Each structure stands twice: as C-alpha cells, then as structure tokens.
C-alpha cells in the first residue's frame, strides 16, 4: 500500500489507513535520529522548498532536518519583513516555484486554505505546515505517533484538549485525527473560545477543566496566544491560568499515568505549570523528536517512496 | 572554447560567441530538471555565496537551486533589517568573503556598479544578479535562451520591450543582449520613462504601444514599480494600464504567433491582463524554468567547466 | 590526546594543551581551503545548528562554510525581527532543539552566559560564538592561530589590545587565551572603557596608546561601537581617533615587523587608518581565512574526531 495522494493538506481528508501507513513509516525513520551518521540517501536529488509566510523556528527546523537527513536539497523561503516577491499573489508564487521543478513545497501561511491554492496550482507535493486557524496536519500526526508509541494503540483512548479551541489549528487537526483512529475527544476552554456546534464534530465540550481531565489518558494543553488577552475573548492571564492552567494540584484529579502533551512553545506558568511540563507524565519533548520522524516519513511517502523501501532505506 | 572571463557583470561586455556558449551549455543543463534525481556532481566541493542586498525570492531561489543541483555548497547572506556586517563597506565585505575562499559570489545590490567593486576586490567569480537600474545579465540570458528555444534562432527576430525602460535593468540587459545576437529591438513606454538618446543604443523608441507591438515576434512586458506612481513620472495605474497594458484586445493587433514574456513578478491587470499572462502565447513560466538551467550553465562555466564536459556532466 | 569537553564556552576554562590541540588540528584543516574540491567527509551525517540571536554575517558564514566543507548538515536559525519561537525561554529552546538530535549548536546571544544555559540543557556540543561582553572564544583561537602561524610560536610574545576593553568579548577572550599560552598582554583604551581591577587579570593597562604599542609584537585593534558615542563613556569620534586610532604616523613608534590585527568589521578612519589596515603589517584577512580552519577543527574535535584522524581526514 502507498500514499494515495499528491498532497497533505488536512487530517480531515486523510483516511485512517493512510494515517496508519504514515505512522508505521515514521517508525522506520525514527531510528535514524539515534545513529552516529544521521543520513540516508532516500531523497537524494529531490528538492524541498520550505515556504514560510509566518515565523516558525520549530516547524521549519523540523522539516529542514527531516529533508536533509534524507539527503534532499532544502531551500528556505521566508517572508519576515519584505513580502514574498513584492506582493505577487500566492497563485503566481506557486506557478513560479513550480516552474523550478521542486518535488515538495512545505507551506505555512496565516490564511486558511492557502495550501489548497498551491496544491491546485502545482504538480509538486504540498504539505500544510499550518494555515491560519484551519489545520496543522503534521502536528496531529506527530501527536498520534507519540500517543501510539506510549500506549501501543490509539483506538479507545480518551484525550482532553484544553485552551483556545476556536482559534487553534492544532486542536482542529488533532480532533479530526483522533476521531479517525477511534479515540474519544473532550474539548475544554472558556465559553468564548469554544467553537459553536462543537458536538457535531464528534467531541464533547466543557468549560470545566476538572470535568475535562477526569479519567482521560492524554491531556493536550494548547498555547495561549497572549496577544488575545484584553480582546474580550479571554479573562486576565491570572484568571485564565487559575481556570484552565494545568497545575500539579489539578493533575492529581486526573487518572494515574495520564500523559501530558503541548505543541510548544509553552507559556510556562500560564497554561502549564513548570513542574508539570518537566514532570514524569510529560511527553512534550517526545513530540518534538517524533516530529522529525513523522516529517521524514511524509516526505518519503509523498515523493513516491514505498513503505517496504522505508525499512530498507533506513536499514 | 571556454568562457574567457572571471565574472559575469554585464551583457554589454559579453561577446556574442560567449552568449552562444552559455546558451548551448544551458541546453545540456536543462534536461537535469526533468530527471527523477536532479543532481550532478559537477560542482562538488565548490562554494557559492548568494549575497543579496535587496529582497528577491525568485532570483535567489533560482541560483540556490542551480548551485545545489550541481552539488555545490550554497551559502545565503541577505540583508533585510540589519545591515551587512554593521555598516562595513562593500569593498571590505568583498575582501572578507574572499578570505573564506568562495568560488562564486552572486550579488544583488541597489547600487549600479556594486558587482564591479566585488569583482575588482575578489578572485572569486562574481555574478551580477541585478545592480540598481544598470544590468541584470542572467535575466537577459535566460530570456534569450527562451526565445531561441521557441524560434530555433535569434538573429533577425524583432522584440518590443514595454514599460518603465529608464529604470529597468531587465530592459537594459535585454537591449544589449538582443542587439548582440542580431535581434531588432523597439522600446516603448511613457515619454518620462524612456531614456534619452535611446536611439544611440541601436533601438527604436516609441510612446505608442500599438506601434511598438506591430509585427514583432516577442513582446516583453516590464513590471511597473507601483511605488513610482505619484512621483510625476507615471500617470495613474488605470491610465498606465490603458496606454501600456497588454490586453487581449491589444494583442489582436500583434503578429500571429507573437510570444509574450515578463520577468516577473507580474502586476496582473496593470501591465498585463491575466488572460494574456496565462494565454497560449505566454512563455513566462518557461522563462523561470530556463532561469535555473542558464544559471547552472554559468556557475559551471565560471568555475572552469568545459562545454564538452557539460554534456558529460549532464549525462 | 582528544578534546576533554563537550562544549567550548570560554577560553578562560580551556587548558593550554587543549588550545594547542585545537590549533594543531586547524593546521590540518587549513589546507582544505586551497583545494580545488573543498570537501572532506569527516562530519557526514552530523547536524550543526547555527543559532544566532544577534546579526552576524562574518561569524555565521565562517561556521556555515566550516560545517559544509566537513560535509555536515548545517541549519541556520536567526532571530532578526521576530523572536525565536514566540518568546520561549532559551532553556525551552535548548530542550526543544535537543529533541531534534543535533550534534553541535553554535550560539551567539546578547546575554553573557547564554551558551552555558544551552550547554547545561543539551547533550549536543555547544560552541559560544559570542555572548554579550563575556567571551568569543573562537575569535581568540583564530587570533592565536594567526599569530602562531606568523611567529612560529606564542610563548614570550607581547601584544597590545586597544579600544573599548570593558565591553569587548574579543578582548576578554584574547586576554585569557594569550595569558594561557605565555604571552604578555597590555590593554589600552579610555579610562572609562578599561575594566577595573584589570591588573588582577594578569595584564598591564594604560590609557596612553604610544606606551601600549611600544615594543609589542602584535597590535590588536578593537572595533569601536559607534552607538556608544555620546553616552559619556567615549569622547567624539574625532577625539577617539586622535587618541586611540592606529595611524601610519603612530605605527612608526612601534617595533619593526609588528603585526596588526582587527576582528572586523573595521571602522576605517576611526580606530584604524586605511593605510594601516591594508598595509604590509596587517594580518587582518589572515584572521578571516584562519577562522574557517579553526572552526573546522573545533567542529571536528567536538564531534569526537581524533587529532590523528584530522590529518587523515584532510589527506
């Protein structure tokens, strides 16, 4: 079985069996990180463009390392101060880049749907590295990988996702992904930050954190965007932290052995207490490590790699 | 025959036979882009520095891909917010970089003549990737390559270049290049944006677009710098577009089979109508594709590659 | 003998024999720069992250070239406009990067001690590429290499370091380094810019330049930070230049054959006259060339390379 798609734009459109294929392939890739020589020739002669319209140290670095360990050529294009190509439309940027024959374009953009525009315009594979409040599918894949690695399975597990659900692409992609693999999801946050009709997405929703975390296997804390404070959507930092912060005290009410996740970067002392972030239940750094493996798997599969070859490539 | 120069600073100083040599070598290189493994070892162990004092997604990416496909090490230095080396003079920057033994430095700079300063200070090969309103020789070379690819020849063809001629390094380099290979050139734009004494350059000049495009084989539209609007040099965008924009309607008055070029990025609906940019006569994306091939050829030849070896390297 | 440390944070803590080991290894590396193919496989499959919180063309480029010539994968992370990872603490950035399994992280930071924080948090090797006014150990190592290359020895030589001693990490690292290898050091600058208790560091201090440069073998001029002018610490540029600038006239009072050094970038006409910077006694560009070799040696040794293997690797 191979990946039946040119692009990875959303988790929502990814069948469960393709999720499994990606996670299985990532297992083969993960071992490469612990080698003395972290390099396999699988993507030699392939060109990957990292097209980042929003700043991101973590995700861009993760994709760049993934590409380079696979021996691909990696080109970074970022748009900090100046605009990409002097105000050229995304469509024209996509067509222009396509004319240079890249194999994969990884895009992060503030506008939901931007990766779809590239995918339609380009024959290269497009990977969505986060588009507005829409999706961040590789984050959800690495989260699922990390959960599966710890529990040995996904189906039947219960997760609470806590924070600014309405504006979070991480929450959205994880909700879709977790549902597809048979997990149960509870969403928790201030009423102003819970999307309407959330139950129609197949998740329970609550504004009470103690209720949300009771008897779940995983608590996934979201980063609070401090720039939203004072917008009327959020109480003060102190109030937010009191109601929705994951503290040692609150963690006592959760299940024994519950695992703590966070997509990073963390606001220590706001949504998560330092003792929890660094405590024995935290698998936050595993998420980062697994991010490289999952992205290697995706790059490999989208450029035509066969799962069996992944084991050989990694061997 | 080999390239008889250390640097590529202008088209003006490049003999016709060296233009032909570069275009011929680019033909060998172009095929690499369509391979499954886009990588040849020709420049392994060579170091290329992309020194960009002006933002440029397109040209920088094109050079970076060209270098990497040839297996060179490519180092990007850009000067967005902060100045290069805290206000160090270009001459000192050049001497400092030279001390690190690069093989090629690609420079883009707002000041005409900046590449010459580097060329005098460094034993590395310098490629001018655009200096002020002076020259942009690799753009002209890729344009000539694209024209030759379509018509099978260059000599005797007629081209109209339309837009802000006075401030355009693309126009200047193309004018010199086209004249050298035996093409006939007409320049067209508002009277305020036509350089004086343009006829002494061997080109006809007109402010009437219909006259400019009549019976030419190629229409090359220039990007209008919107920041020049309101400077007194240019009418309003609407007026400019009405007088000098390439529309479907206007195109009907051109020769059957005329080819449309644009160096990008385009202002769609200003200097060029979307239907024309994306229409059957447009070879705008071919220009981008050929840009990589032409730059590969240049990098190869300037680092001592022999034309015969280009065919072997690409084989 | 191998390097007995995970990190290079300071010269102060580096024993003289390890300095010698690095300089000896750099000799093997230097020859690579003059080859036709500047590439050895020594660090293939190793990952180096250049984490620059301050702009630096020269040092970042030097490390990037050093890594690439050794065949390492080099990842650049810089924080110009946007903050690294949205305000994440350096400690969390370090832990996050560690989770991606780099072999070396090169850090430049405005705060003294920042590299130590990374070193404590990461199992990767940390190289301090300049931290506030604290240390810049690779600069001192390349300076010692350059001096040794010219004189054939270090012990017994006398050096004057002139400029804003109090705020200079270059001065601090060189002072420690020179003392360790048996050199005699004189520090010279305006009284406001000489650190207190300087004599306890084992150096003589003076505010009189003629006295400082008399009979020394090396004069090392520091870059004056023009943004400090008008702060009350410094006289006017003209006054500074008159009192502490190295001019042809002043140089006549120095020893025959004295060598002139500067870490760059230079303020020509302020701390150093152009005729001196470009004159026969200047070894300023040798410093730049040797910087690549010294950084190659460090990257090689810190990733477990054996000195004997360095000669083999370079052979």
Image: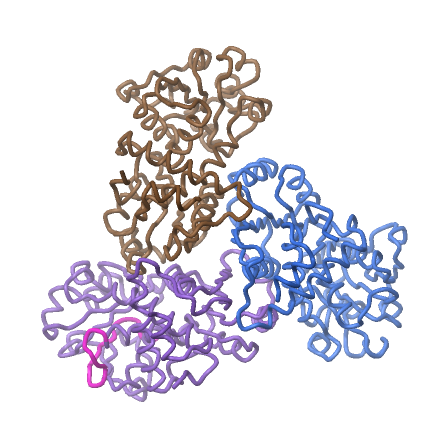
Chain colours: A brown, B purple, C blue
**Residue B158 falls within the magenta-colored stretch:** yes
Residue drawn at x 27%, y 62% is B236
Residue A284 appears left or right of C180:
left
Answer whether residue C134 is visible to the viewer in this image: no
Q: State the image coordinates of residue C86 (x, y, percent, origin top left).
A: 51, 39
For the N terminus of chain A, give its image quadrant.
top left
Whether residue B299 is visible to the viewer of this picture, yes or no, is yes
Counting from the top left corner in percent of width and height, residue A117 is at 26, 46
Given residues B49 and B157, the one toward you in this image is: B49
Viewport quadrant of the C terminus of chain A: top left
The residue sitting at 27% across, 60% down in the picture is B267
Magenta segment boundaries in residue numbering: B149-167
Residue C161, horizontal then vertical, whole percent: 80, 63
Would residue C224 appear left or right of C180 to someone viewing this image? Answer: left
Q: Is residue C172 magenta?
A: no
Task: Work out whether A69 lies above or below A285.
Answer: below
Q: Quadrant of residue A175?
A: top left
- Pick the front one: C187 or A156: A156
State the count of labels: 0
| Location of residue C61 (image quadrant) | bottom right
Percent from the top left, x then y, of residue A249? 56, 13
Q: Residue at x 36, y 19 (%)?
A: A185
> Foreground: B247 or C9?
C9
Quarter of the image where one finds residue B213 = bottom left
């Amino acid at each position: 079985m191979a990946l039946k798609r040119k692009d990875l734009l959303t988790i929502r459109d990814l069948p469960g069996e393709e999720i499994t294929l990606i996670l299985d392939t990532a297992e083969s890739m993960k071992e490469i990180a612990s080698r003395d020589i972290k390099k396999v020739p699988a993507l030699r002669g392939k060109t990957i463009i990292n097209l980042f319209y929003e700043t991101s140290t973590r995700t861009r670095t993760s994709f760049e390392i993934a590409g380079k360990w696979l021996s691909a050529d990696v080109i970074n294009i970022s748009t900090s101060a100046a605009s990409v190509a002097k105000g050229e439309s995304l469509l024209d940027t996509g067509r222009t880049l396509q004319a240079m024959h890249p194999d994969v374009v990884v895009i992060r953009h503030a506008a939901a749907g931007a990766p779809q525009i590239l995918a339609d315009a380009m024959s290269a594979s497009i990977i969505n590295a986060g588009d507005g409040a829409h999706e961040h599918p590789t984050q959800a894949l690495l989260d699922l990988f990390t959960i599966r690695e710890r529990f040995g399975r996904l189906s039947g597990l219960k997760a609470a996702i806590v924070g600014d659900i309405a504006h979070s692409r991480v929450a959205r992609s994880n909700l879709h992904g977790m549902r597809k693999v048979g997990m149960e999801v509870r969403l928790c946050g201030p009423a102003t930050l819970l999307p309407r009709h959330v139950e129609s997405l197949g998740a329970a929703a609550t504004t009470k954190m103690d209720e949300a975390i009771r008897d779940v296997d995983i608590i996934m804390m979201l980063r609070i965007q401090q720039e939203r404070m004072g917008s009327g959507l959020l109480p003060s930092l102190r109030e937010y932290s009191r109601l929705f912060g994951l503290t040692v005290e609150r963690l006592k009410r959760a299940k024994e052995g519950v695992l703590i996740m966070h997509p990073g970067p963390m606001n220590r002392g706001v949504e998560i207490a330092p003792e929890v972030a660094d405590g024995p239940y935290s698998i936050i750094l595993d998420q980062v490590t697994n991010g490289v493996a999952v992205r290697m798997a995706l790059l490999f599969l989208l450029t035509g790699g066969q799962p069996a070859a992944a084991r050989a490539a990694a061997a």
